[in-house]
Amino acid sequence: MVSGFGTTRTRAGQPEPAVMPPTHLLRYASAAAAAATASAARVAQADGCPIKSNKPSGGGGCPIKGSNNMPATPQQAKAPGQTTTLDTKREASTIPQKGGAQTWQYPSPQMFWNALVRKDKADGAEETDMDTVVAVHNTMNEATWSKILEWEKLRTGPPPELVRFTGRPHDLSPKALLKIYVFGHPKPFDRHDWVVSRGEEERRYVIDYYSDEGLASKDERPRTMHDYAALKSIAVDARPALDSVGAVLDRVVHMPSLRSSGEASPALPLRPPSSMSEDPRAMIREKCSLRAKALASCGDDEKNCADAAIALQHCVASVVCPREAEAFREAAVSNKNAEQAYQAMDAALDAWSAQNGSVLSERPD
């Protein structure tokens, strides 16, 4: 039997469920494109754009179209140091694009890898993972659109079209804050805002993406873009932003009525299910094992050992104190205030270890 991230086949030629990559790779699918028609896995943007910014380019100097927040020129060349050839084919979504007769195009595996490398987010990912990351990303986007179409049943006019979208991975929505601080729900791993139009009338949707680590072992690689059941660990919470009286009425009155009649899927609960319990130690072992092994094998080279120790610290921090970890990464890349950012990250790690015990000294897997 041949194993891998694609579909496997037995000697009899019968297909088996595809093997999924480690759980944290699912989240690359979400951030690595901020949606490309949105959604999701752990952090980075599909073409370096778009992400919420006051600058005319998406973080990596990538020009974007102001009309839809999409990159003006897709990046399809090989990334520096890339050793494998990745597919550059882009799959068409089923999501209508505003102002044109075509649908939105999803990023290719090559575009995803370029974005991860350019954003310095490729730690823990492999070039050969990209086909699966793209499959997950595309399925999450289609699932998001299906949720939005349920809300669009409450509006009239021309067929809905997606105008633009924005990745907001660091901005918690009001509903997410309520779930976290009142009901003890884990944080969403990503957030996007989509703007949908019916003719000239636009409506903004807020989408939170949650990962249920207790169901991650049951995930499979989606066989098609609409194989939503394959991603059992990922939940999509899409709803209109409270930007108008109509949106408020839809959320408070009309959608509950639609759901009670069975014409829309049930709302996600405010309280987390029993399976949704994130174990930071397990996540650290999964994500940082290679960093721990690099530190254990650095030998007597002081510089290499120091670099390996900082890399391991940053990896652990990305799990237990992600804001400080991201601040340190940005400071190191820009070479501005890196020492202060490192001290802040180190202090946050010490505070977490004081409550939970150190994981840095544990034997790597």
Image (spheres, rainbow, N blue to C red):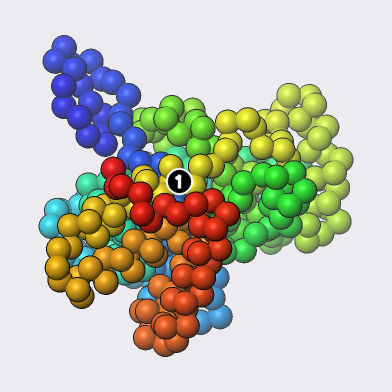
Q: Residue at x 42, y 62 (%)?
A: 45
Residue 57: x %, y % from top left = 44, 78
Q: Identify the amino acid type marked 1.
A: Arg
Which residue is outermost to the top?
12
Check the image and report above or below for 134 versus 351.
Answer: above
Displayed quadrant of residue 263? top right
Residue 362: x %, y % from top left = 35, 49
Toward the viewer: 215 or 347?
A: 347
Is residue 91 at all visible to an observer of this figure? no
Check the image and report above or below for 71 versus 221.
Answer: below
Which residue is outermost to the bottom?
336
Is residue 212 at all visible to an observer of this figure? yes
Residue 74: x %, y % from top left = 32, 65
Q: Residue at x 24, y 60 (%)?
A: 295
Dot 1 surroundings within 10 Å: few (below 14), some, or many (20 or more)? some
Count of numbered circles in the view: 1
Q: Which residue is mark 1?
A: 281
Quadrant position of the N terminus in the picture: top left
Displayed quadrant of residue 118? bottom left
20 vs 85, left or right, is right
Toward the viewer: 278 or 133?
A: 278
Q: Residue at x 43, y 27 (%)?
A: 218
Residue 236: x %, y % from top left = 59, 42
Quadrant position of the C terminus in the picture: top left
Label 1, secondary structure: give it.
Answer: helix
Check the image and report above or below for 361 versus 304.
Answer: above
Q: Residue at x 47, y 77 (%)?
A: 343
Toward the viewer: 10 or 214?
A: 214
